[in-house]
Image (cartoon, rainbow, N blue to C red):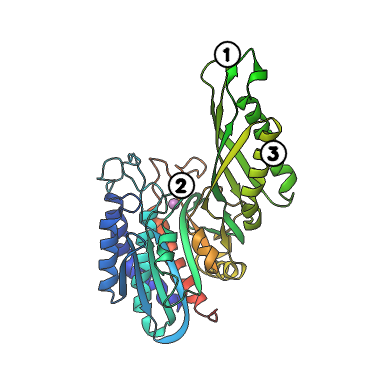
Amino acid sequence: MIEQVLSLEERFRSTYLSYWKDIHTYPELSDQEIRTAEKVATVLRSLGLEVLTGVGTTGVVGLLRGSQNGPTIGLRADMDALSIEEKTGVPFASKNPGIMHACGHDSHTAMLLGAAHILSELKGSIKGVIKFIFQPAEENSPTGGAPGMIRDGVLENPAIDYMIGIHVWPTLKTGTIGVREGAMSAASDRLHITIKGRSAHASTPQRGIDAIVASAQVINALQSIISRNVSPLDQAVITIGTIQGGSRYNIIPEEVFLDGTVRTFDPGTRGKMPEWITRAAKGTAEALGAEAIVDYKFGYPSLMNNVELVNKAKEVIREIVGKRGLIDIKMPDLGGEDFAFFSEKVPAVFAWIGCCPREEACEKYPMLHNNRFIPDESALPYGVKYLVLSTLKLMEMEKR
Ligand code: NI
């Protein structure tokens, strides 16, 4: 089968590369992927797939039913771009002012369409069902686009057994693919604390309750959560990024506002954070006569790779790029990735497709969300082969 996949990939290469360049030229923001979704749906229909549109907001799902029974595999690509003015200078640069595909989601969409072309040709030998999932609003943190598609039933009917996702990764060379067991990205939550005291003149603190002194102690108490509540074998970060309070040097302020972010990997640790933070903030403020009001907002969960699927993915990666092309990722990424919502529900594997051109120094190559970021064109065929071969590999497994 692998020979057949490789030759089909060559046959459809110019087709999916043209999709990439077209989508790159006309980037669209989160939940506004109208043109992109239309293009995706048109291609999927031309392949004879059953197509659903408007899933979540602008999401598109294509269904390929194989000739024999087997598991259902979900393949996911994101479609949205960012409000960034493009400075790549490529001939197919953005024609939508102030909007740019700076995170490579255009390439994900094109690679998944390429995989749809190839897998459609193999329909006669496919054992199971393949769902091609084109997701809106990956960049729309903390909401994201995956939860909307899940609410609209993308994981059901038929129920997805295993799920595959990719992201182009500019710190890895073209011709390499990276993966790791467990966390690929951190959970990223938002924290807002209001400390309420009582205003007074700076010279008469006994008449007031100093919200600034209370906030200083609250911040210290929060750091004790990391050292005393979180297991030393687990990892977490609480960062207070802004403090606002006070209006004049000689007035004790009534209120102080703290804004921050909480990053965790272990879902248990994450689940306890609101309680730990609320207890530390309220108790500390109360000891000083002040009051703390904690608003904890859950964002993207941690993207968890299933161990068994990672092992299957590694077999595929070795087949495509050899042992040296397989990168064992040491540290998860601390940015968010909303594929995590899928990985919470279904065993999933997410891989990074190296896209730093071979002749470039990758540590200097523009990173994701940079206005000069463009994935190496010759990286896309690796992503397409990976999507197709890992789908075929997972189809050999039992239904869940
Ligand atoms: Ni991205």
Is 141 situated above or below 50? above
| Residue type of the residue flagged with mark 1 | Asn
The residue drawn where x is 31% and y is 76% is 50
- Mark 3 residue crowding within 10 angstroms, few (<14) / some (14–19) / many (20+): some
The residue drawn where x is 47% and y is 56% is 338
Q: Secondary structure at mark 1?
A: loop
Circle 3 residue: 283
Viewport quadrant of the C terminus: bottom right
The dot on residue 359 is 2
| Residue type of the residue flagged with mark 3 | Gly
Q: Position of residue 210 (x, y in %)?
A: 63, 24
Circle 1 residue: 250
Q: Secondary structure at mark 2?
A: loop
Q: Position of residue 290 (x, y in %)?
A: 64, 31
Q: Position of residue 162 (x, y in %)?
A: 51, 72
| Residue type of the residue flagged with mark 2 | Glu
The image quarter in which residue 250 lies:
top right
